Amino acid sequence: MTLADYITRHLRVPFFYGRMDCVLFAAGWVREKTGAEPLDGIAIWETERQAMRAVKAAGGLEAALDARFPRVNPNLAKDGDLALYGKSICIFSGDHIVGPGKDGLEFINRMEAACAWSI
């Protein structure tokens, strides 16, 4: 599956903890692209509270990503690489980073990415 296909499949799916949150959206892409399971060793959640506990137990999103993927300069990130935007994980796609929002996927200027990781 291409990145465009993956994004299109999730385009209108609203954010929901445990089903379509930023971590699960990014993890699904990593699984699709690499076949690897990026959530090994992380407890799965169903609520916001459980998700926050899982993130805290992993040392935070940035630390969890550092432990699993090589960090790259956001200016050099390629389509499909992962981005940290605020407290969310997004996927680089063209001029944007993409992640779940209230009414479906949101597209944010890629220059807003604080950190990036290559998959």
Image (cartoon, rainbow, N blue to C red):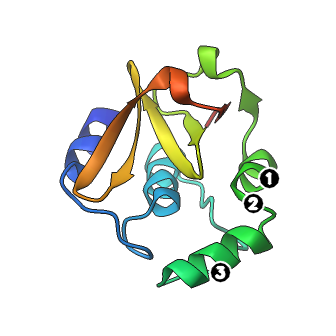
How far apart are labels 1 and 2 at the CA level?
Answer: 5 Å
Type of the residue with mark 3: Ala
How far apart are labels 2 and 3 at the CA level?
Answer: 13 Å
Q: Can residue 103 be seen in this view?
A: yes
Q: Can residue 44 be seen in this view?
A: no
Query: Is disc 2 in contact with disc 3, using a CB cutoff of under 8 Å?
Result: no
Pinpoint residue 36: horizontal percent, then vertical percent.
Answer: 59, 55
How far apart are labels 1 and 3 at the CA level?
Answer: 16 Å
Pinpoint residue 20: horizontal percent, then vertical percent.
Answer: 37, 65
Query: Is disc 1 in contact with disc 2, using a CB cutoff of under 8 Å?
Result: yes
Question: Which residue has dot 1 on it?
Answer: 63
Type of the residue with mark 1: Ala
Please indicate whether residue 83 sits to the left or right of residue 41 in the image: left
Please tell me in which quadrant of the rendered image residue 73 appears: top right
**Chain-order first, disc 2 or disc 3:** 3
- Which residue lies at the image location 22% right of the left edge and 50% below the top edge? 9
Please indicate whether residue 15 sits to the left or right of residue 57 in the image: left
- Report the quarter where the N terminus lies: top left
Mark 3 packing: few (<14 Cα in 10 Å), some, or many (20+)?
few
Question: Which residue has dot 3 on it?
Answer: 43
Pinpoint residue 117: horizontal percent, then vertical percent.
Answer: 66, 35
Please tell me in which quadrant of the rendered image residue 72 appears: top right
SS category of the residue bearing label 2: loop
User: Residue 105's mark?
Assistant: none
Pinpoint residue 63: horizontal percent, then vertical percent.
Answer: 80, 52
Question: Which residue has dot 2 on it?
Answer: 60
How many numbered discs, if any?
Answer: 3
Name the mark nearer the viewer: 2 or 3.
Answer: 2
**Chain-order first, disc 1 or disc 3:** 3
- Which residue lies at the image location 47% right of the left edge and 57% below the top edge? 22
- Report the quarter where the C terminus lies: top right
